[in-house]
Image: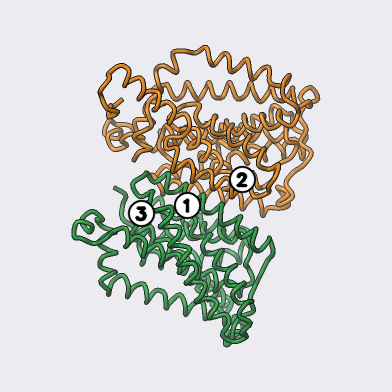
Chain colours: A green, B orange
Amino acid sequence: MSFDVLFNQFMSGIARGALLFLVASGLSLTFGVLRVLNFAHGSLYMLGAFLSYSVWTFLLMPTFGFYIAALLVAVIMGVVGLIIEFGLLRRLYSRGWPEQLLATYAIILIITDLVKWGWGGAFLSIPRPEPFTGAVFLFDFPFPSYNFFIILLGVGLVIFLWWLVYRTRLGDIIRAAAHDREMVSALGIPIPWLFTAVFVLGAAIAGLSGAVTAPFGSVALGMDIEIIIECFAVVVIGGMGSLPGTLLGSFIVGQVYAFGIMFLPNLALAFIFLVMAVVLIIRPWGIFGRPER
Amino acid sequence: MTMEANRTKENEGWTKRKWWIIVLILLFLAAPAVLNEFYLTVLCEALVMGMLAISFNLLFGYMGQMSFGQAAFYGLGGYTVAMLMVKWQFNFWLSIVAGVLVAAIAGLIVGYFCVRLRGIYFAVLTLAFGQLIWTVVFKWHDFTGGDDGIQGVFPPDFLKAPSSYYYLILIVFLISSWVIWKIVHSPFGHTIQAMRENSERTEFLGINIARYQLMAFVIAAALAGLAGAVWVPFYRSVAPSYLTWIKSGEPVMAAILGGPSVFLGPVLGTFVMTFFHAWVLGFTVYWPVVMGALILFIIFFLPGGILGFAIDTIKERRDKEKHPGKGMNHVS
């Protein structure tokens, strides 16, 4: 196997890792602060993808339609997140995690049927937006330039989240609340609103990532569970609630997927699980995670 | 917290008076004479899913670990029976035994990794492994039939009539739930309940938590496999949807609906759900959204599930009669 083939595979692994980070970062951020694992995070992503198709069709703008649609969808999904957090989750923080998990599971069922009802079972896609329509040649291999857009977006999100969490006052509060929410509350910071803000941010990121996957031509029912399983692998490997962990986990899962698919195209997922199993044996709480109390 | 606290030990009054169990069994024995074929089929499904719910609740209600991948073992049991009988013309009974064994072995492998984790982490890992098993079955078309599943799984002639197969399912259900009842009330059962209450203390007593949890996990997987193995010849076919996490969610919901703190709570939950499902499908295909709404309803308005809620209410009333004037803040 020559170097250029490997490099091409490596690059598509990076693109896949970037997409995974887009979705998993919201999941991890929500878990880190709220301590609620949102099973429905993948469904928010799926809803975002379907919505972006509709918004894009509605806008009828060839050049910028896609970008505007993606941003609008992020806003809409933020509102959806607000409704979910305010209407449901907020009442469950005092309850046990089984109830919280089950409530997010119920949201999955509801969103799945909403999508089925609203869009049918069709496969939808949006053409790749300018200027990412063509392919770039990496050592004679065509590499879709849209992948670079995803990678750029992933890097942008890493920087944004890093800035938000480590360089702003909100970030200080977020990190403090992840550590000891009672103490933060005692200092007069309204924890419920912090939770709302974080959940809305997570939902908006999920919607945005759903929107930007539409040009891959994979908007369909079932994309929610497909991505959430891989995201679970990402956060289990990297450590739940840790942003550096999510970044590393996304990178690992992306690479394992890209190279696994070369050997056993149908069972790339099995390789991801193999890595997950190894991590679990050595560090059950993930590479960057904290041991459970 | 409420759920952990509400999980009481078996209520004394319920276990001492056993006559109602006999009445129930008699009712079930008489069912084929009363029900038409459609409702008999629904009843069979309810019994099989009830076994799956008991298997789930051994882990959840008793051990305190939520498995979100129980359907994978159910599906493995079903697929083993279907493949052995259709592809290699295996004996019916041997195939069912093989189905249980395959599920138990899969449970041993998956459980080996999962029992290292607690709480949400355990739920996520079981879910992920369940989906992995589903992916293998779904994509390995040459071996499992992939999306098409396997059709034409017929039981022996004397079991072909729904009413006779119903009795087989009923017997399997009764024996397996009796076995699980015995396990739950054995020293082993008390140990896993101790781990639910406080795993640290249990560990300090010198108990190897991982080993006990693995044993419980394998037992639960075997029972789930048995449920799938007896269901498939009745339904005559098996499909990958048997292994999905939507299916895994059903016992979770059944347990929480019926009440995980009571042995038969999950079975009651299954019955309510299965008959409700049969009824809802009469006028809409959007069953998941109904199920989602139902879950939210239970979580918000019926904490502890139907039986858990009922028993708590009865207890409270009794306490009030015995000690009038005292509040409800008793500790059982």
**Residue at mark 3 to residue at mark 1: CA–CA distance:** 13 Å
Q: Position of residue B257 (x, y in %)?
A: 50, 36
Chain for numbered disc 2: B
Sequence-wise, which precedes: disc 3 or disc 1?
3
What amino acid type should be assigned to the residue bearing mark 2?
A: Leu
Residues behind callouts 3 and 1 on a single chain = yes
Q: Determine whether, in the image, residue A170 is placed left or right of residue A88.
A: left
The residue depicted at 54 percent of the width and 16 percent of the height is: B21
The residue depicted at 73 percent of the width and 49 percent of the height is: B145
What amino acid type should be assigned to the residue bearing mark 3?
A: Arg
Q: Residues within 10 Å of mark 2 (few under 14, many from 20)?
A: many
Q: Determine whether, in the image, residue B171 is placed left or right of residue A31.
A: right
Q: Position of residue B249 (x, y in %)?
A: 54, 44
Would you place residue B259 above or below residue B13 in this image? below
Q: Locate the N terminus of chain A and report the quarter of the image it occupies.
A: bottom right
Q: From the viewer's perspective, is the residue at label 2 or at label 3 nearer? A: 3
Q: Report the disc number at residue A104.
A: 1
Between B285 and A289, the one nearer to me in the picture: B285
What amino acid type should be assigned to the residue bearing mark 1?
A: Thr
The number of discs equals 3
Residues behind callouts 2 and 3 on a single chain = no
Between A118 and B122, the one nearer to me in the picture: A118
Quadrant of res B27: top right
Q: Report the disc number at residue A35.
A: 3
Q: Residue A127, can we see it?
A: yes
Chain for numbered disc 3: A
Q: Residues within 10 Å of mark 3 (few under 14, many from 20)?
A: some
Q: Position of residue B108 (x, y in %)?
A: 50, 39
Q: Residue A134, can we see it?
A: no
Q: From the viewer's perspective, is the residue at label 1 or at label 2 nearer? A: 1
